[in-house]
Image (cartoon, rainbow, N blue to C red):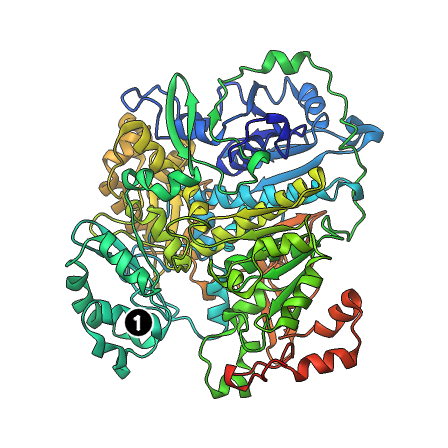
Amino acid sequence: MAPSDPDRLVLNGLRVLEIGSGPAVAYAGKLFADFGAEVIKVEPAQGDEWRKMPPLLNPRDPDSESALFAWLNTNKRSVRADPGRDARWLAELAIGCDVVLDGRALSADAAPGPLWTRDDAGRAGDPIRIDFTWFGADGPYSGFAGAESVVRALSGAVHGSGPVAGPPHMPHDLQVGIVGGLQAFSAAIAAWIGRAQGSRHYTLSLHEAVFGLVEMEAGMVQDGRHPLRRLGVNRFCNAHPAGIYETADGWIGLFTHTLPQWSALCAEIGRPELAAAPAYATGPDRINHADEIDAFLIPAMRRRTAREWFERLGARKYPAVLVPSMEELLRQQVHRERGAFAVVAAGGVRFEGPVVPFRLGAEGPLPGGEAPRFGAHGDLYRSLPHAPRAAARRQPAPAGSLPLAGVRILDLSMGWAGPLASRTLADLGADVIKVESITYPDWWRGTNFNEPFYRERLYEKVSNFNMMNRNKLGITLDLTQPRGRELLLSLLKLCDACIENYSAEVLPKLGLAYDTMRAVHPGIVVLSMPAFGLGNAWSDTRAYGGTLEQASGLPLYTGHAAHPPAMTSYAFGDPVGGMNAGAALLLGILAQRVTGKGRHINFSQVEAMLPMTAPFMIEQSVAGRVPTRQGNRHPLRAPHGCYRCAGEDAWVALSVDTGAAWIALCRLLGRFDWEQDARLRAASGRQARCEEVGAAIAAWTARLDADAAMAALQAAGIPAGVVRPMREVLDDAHLNARGFWKTAERPYAGRYKSTSPPLREAGAPLPVARPAPTLGQHTREVFAALLDLDDAAVDALEAAGVCGTQARPKARRPSAN
């Protein structure tokens, strides 16, 4: 249900100042605006530079404004300001807001001072403030010139993707901005929920924020389960087939994780005997024989249409999805029925783009809207008084406090996406109770249920699980037993929200559908997150993170035209889904506090990927077509790419974003003739000679190791970063200096490295208060504190197999009484 009454939008009445350029601050502002906040976008005298970012509203007019900018800025108000001349007015405007999103530090020539002083704010105190930076305010990289491609390269999110020989694939701009904008938005909403404690000032590092996309790889490297090398286009460690295959009429996405899935695929292609072949028994076995498998799989997949494969494999519960072009995606009925696309209006042009991918019904978001004309609202805001808003004025929150203290979440999720969503709230202070079963533990603890798995408690030694579930309490309950369900519902009554990511049919079969939960707790917020959402023709589709990326259509526009549509080398859809689900859950809790009502958030993880496709979806809608894959080229920056350095598989990424950076590069290369060549002053001229320019850069970088090349480029003011493999990221000097890596210690696992949130408050990382729980570690503590059950009662539950602290094979589970 789309909202019809703006006054009911969950952020109605909130005033937000957005200042600075780029997609991170713009997307954070878009989330506020689309949920009803009054967002004041401050632009410099010449307008936001993203007003010229392709795709354009009129593709035939190079002076046209950007359709992508319009989508990023729906429902906002635009004012023009000169930072020097208008400093006093900007200070008054800022302290008259509830939230300030400050992205000035992301600009190439930025050296921003404070927007306001303590004297400006006076006794009323400060608004909530989020400062966006490329690398944070301290550490060896803090003075670096930044770009999306640079922070992504340094985070380990580039090295693993692309052909074995290189160069690695650089995903498109906007994606880092969306990730950073989401995390800034979540922090600000948490601060608003907890505003009674006081105001908060967070600094966000986009470098650390984007690391959230590849956190799984950090765990795998620590556990010795990562190949430490690039495997090739659409090749994943420990899983195969897991890529995109051509069919009779298009593309199908496959992802084979378990032996039953491999068996189903073999049967469907008419080769059932291969399911029992010892050489192909496990994911690592199959990736080691990937060329052999693809030799028979590629021709087999061409025998049927993509939809035939999707339906036949789906009937076998195999994770297969259509990989659509943007034209096909915009026609998909499932997304149409869910309202995943909406009309944006700007400059007399109307086009479709993705809707914010979490829905609260009447409380938001707005479906589409209109983008503001440059400076259209300046007169309005220059004439208004800007006294601090009483609802938001607070002194700084006490040191060591967290905004979500007192919020309680019941976490029924497993894997990456759901636990990441709940961890977002746990990191911000919520009490998160993670529920597992001794016979069905979280599958991120491992899926090889052999005898050593149980005897050696291997399920306690997986770094991925341990990183994803920090700051949580852990209990066990067998939800197939009546007593387990009864205890779960008793806990639910005491919680603000519940998150689950089971397959769509699981909770209803257990007697734990939303209606049952609502009956015992009418105010509960429940978030369900299947791949395509609930209640539609594709709701039962099995999916992993790679499946979500495939279904978004993004791979058709990633990589080089000489290769098949290219996925990233990590499970891209999982962290993106988790970050969005965390933001959705926070908004649900805020709406609960405003309205007193609960709700069921029907969340689609595929839709969470659609904002990443916005440049391509919008271009399809505006121009009727989208260009083929462009490799590592950028629509406005040149040169832009990965260049080989001295050493094995060593690369540096660079992105020339200004005329000054181009001149600096010419001087580094000794190409003073290029510096004087008027044809190369514009990025378009350099793009026309990209092969020549790229060859000169490659010849220069080949003589240097990657860190030396980065240092030389950065010293010249050119955005550049080493394309770090994950093993180097784990020892990165900047991340270590900033305290991003935390050494955690946990029973059975010993010491390991864990990440911390990408936010700093008063210069300090948010705390990692407790490591991930061992199986059932806090069952007695939680049952005693919340359900008044003593040790004898818990002993009886353990004897019946309802709970416990040691995993058991299903056959050993005691029968229910």
Q: Residue furthest front?
A: 817
Instruction: Left or right? Give the position of 670 relative to 520.
Output: left
Please state which amino acid type lies under the numbered disc 1.
Trp
Nearest the eye: 795 or 712: 795
Q: Where is residue 585 in the image (x, y as percent from the top left)?
A: 60, 48
Instruction: Left or right? Give the position of 622 relative to 731.
Output: left
**Which residue sits at x=64%, y=39%?**
130
Give neighbour class at mark 1: few <14, some 14-19, many 20+ (Cα, 10 Å): many
Instruction: Left or right? Give the position of 400 relative to 251.
Output: right
Nearest the eye: 377 or 169: 377
- Which of the 4 quarters of the picture holds residue 793? bottom right
Q: Which secondary structure lies at badge 1?
A: helix
Q: Position of residue 166 (x, y in %)?
A: 29, 57
Placement of 756 over or under 632, stated as above or below: below
Q: Position of residue 561 (x, y in %)?
A: 22, 47
**Which residue sits at x=54%, y=34%?**
365
Residue identifier under label 1: 262
Nearest the eye: 613 or 534: 534
Placement of 58 over or under 587, stated as above or below: above
**Which residue sits at x=43%, y=59%?**
724
Q: Which residue lies furthest to the right in this view?
A: 123
Total marks in image: 1
**Which residue sits at x=56%, y=60%?**
419
Quadrant showing the C terminus: bottom right
Instruction: Left or right? Give the position of 631 relative to 650.
Output: left
Instruction: Examine the rendering and report whether any part of residue 705 can be seen.
Output: no
- Which of the 4 quarters of the picture holds residue 749? bottom right
Q: Position of residue 730 (x, y in %)?
A: 52, 64
Instruction: Examine the rendering and report whether any part of residue 401 can be seen.
Output: yes
